[in-house]
Amino acid sequence: MSPFLARTACFLLLLAGSMAVHAQPANDSDSTKYIRARSFNLAFTLPADDRERVQSLKLYVTSPGGRDWQLHATATPSQTRPAPGSNMLQGNFDVRLDREGSYDFAIMTVYRDGRSLPESVERLTAEQRVVIDTRPPDVGLRAAAPKQRTDGSVVVGIEWQITDEYLDPNSIRMEGRWVGGLPAWGDLSERAGVAAQGRKEWTLAPGRRMEVRLSALDRAGNRADKFLVLGAGVGQTTGSSTEPGGAPREGGAYDAQPGYKITNDKTLKLQFKVREATLSGIDTVELWATLRGNDWRKVDQQFSPPAEGSDVAEIEYTVPQDGTYGLTLVARSKAKIAQPAPSGNQPPQIWVVVDTKEPDIEQFIVKFAQANNPRTLVLTWKAKDEHLEAQPVIFQYLVLDKNGRALNKNGKGDEWIDLTPQLANTGRHVCATPQLPAGSYQFKVRMTVADRAGNVAESVFKDPVNIDVTPPHVEIIDVKPTKPQNKSDNPNQP
């Protein structure tokens, strides 16, 4: 094969999951790859027939359209492996960049006879453009002013604007769910999809509420979510849930909600303020609770009013179990006058979600992308919880010394280092194996999952990851007797 043909058979490949795709010229917009990590693998192929002819492959990088090519990494044919189903060899460049931005990459093939293709750095041509982007889109979401109608219904709405240099317009999703009902999200998008900027309204029946989630991805896979609870009061910012299910629809009914909190403590400290004082003053304070929005009951507990001369106070109430509680305070004056107790579908003053359970880690697998190549890790996981954050998972690693003890950058202690950015609750992530200190060949991987209530679940992968995948080789060089030999035992002796 001629050097020219050998050169044209050497392509840049970008690992995406477990598959690699051939790069197109960098000036083709479809060839640009977007990555949300500054460390990744850039793969190459080489004809198997050229294994003995090629000395090395050099990866160069420059700014888009630039000519100031800088050598970034070098690989040799000995670092390749056969590509299944072809007469090609596959290898990887370990790319580690210091900052975000756009980069062009090109390969120079150096032969053992001293020639190279292209002949010089000045003749390099960009073969792959990569955009490093670790920042999620900016999702602005706010509630429009509610409009009360004469029949008791209320018109609520949202206004939004999503900005990102690399926004994926097809990724924008608008979802909704009942508040106080099933933790289920469903699609609220129009048939034409959701624009990056807009406004939407719903008409809600008296005393009902809804929660809206707006999410977007950029081309690198960074995700941003914003949430609002809507009803007769103003919109309240909340968190996320990933459980499947139905969604509210136009014209549906939702409970109004002026407040919405999530906590992992069954003992609630409720702060309240006297909005309107009376001549006689406050004698007692009653706490009323509901679970379904229409099953109001008075809490069998005595609560003290604010101290003399003060209009604020705090009371404690311990709920019996996890769940969503609607709470309303009713004050009774010393003249025995009080507002009516809540009843029917009357909305509470605040909804409180009590969640004391840690997220459930159902799957956690760490392995190399190629069994005999420790340069790339594949993480597979699944976590569940009713109140997960939008990106609740992060993976970290802990370097171990030769004896399996923790070893940090300073050579001592216990230091977990981020291996990935924050990720969704379920997925598969490919990343470069971390660079270990000299003399270390293994590390532990930990998965951490957090929910909106502050509960955290951690799991350390059952086995340390061992980057020493080369089997040792020994051979016999001599045989020594275990006792002295007599001359008579050796027939060759005279």
Image (cartoon, rainbow, N blue to C red):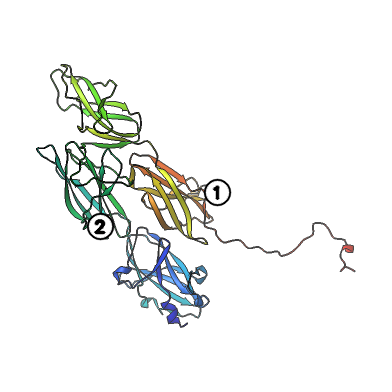
Which element carries disc 2, helix, strand or loop? Answer: loop
Residue sticking out furthest to the bottom: 2
The residue where tag 1 is placed is: 404
Please give left or right for residue 467 compared with residue 252 in the image: right
Q: Quadrant of residue 16?
A: bottom left
Q: Residues within 10 Å of mark 1 (few under 14, many from 20)?
A: some
* Residue type pointed to by label 2: Asp
Closer to us: 451 or 110: 451
Q: How many marks?
A: 2
- Location of residue 429 (image quadrant): bottom left
Residue 254, quarter of the rendered image = top left
Query: In the rendered structure, which amino acid carries the disc numbered 1?
Result: Gly
Q: Position of residue 376 (x, y in %)?
A: 46, 60
Relative to 328, 401 lies left or right: right
Say left or right for 177 vs 107.
Answer: left
Work out whether 356 lies above or below 126.
above
Q: Which residue is mark 2?
A: 164
Q: Name the residue at 16% across, 37% down.
A: 206
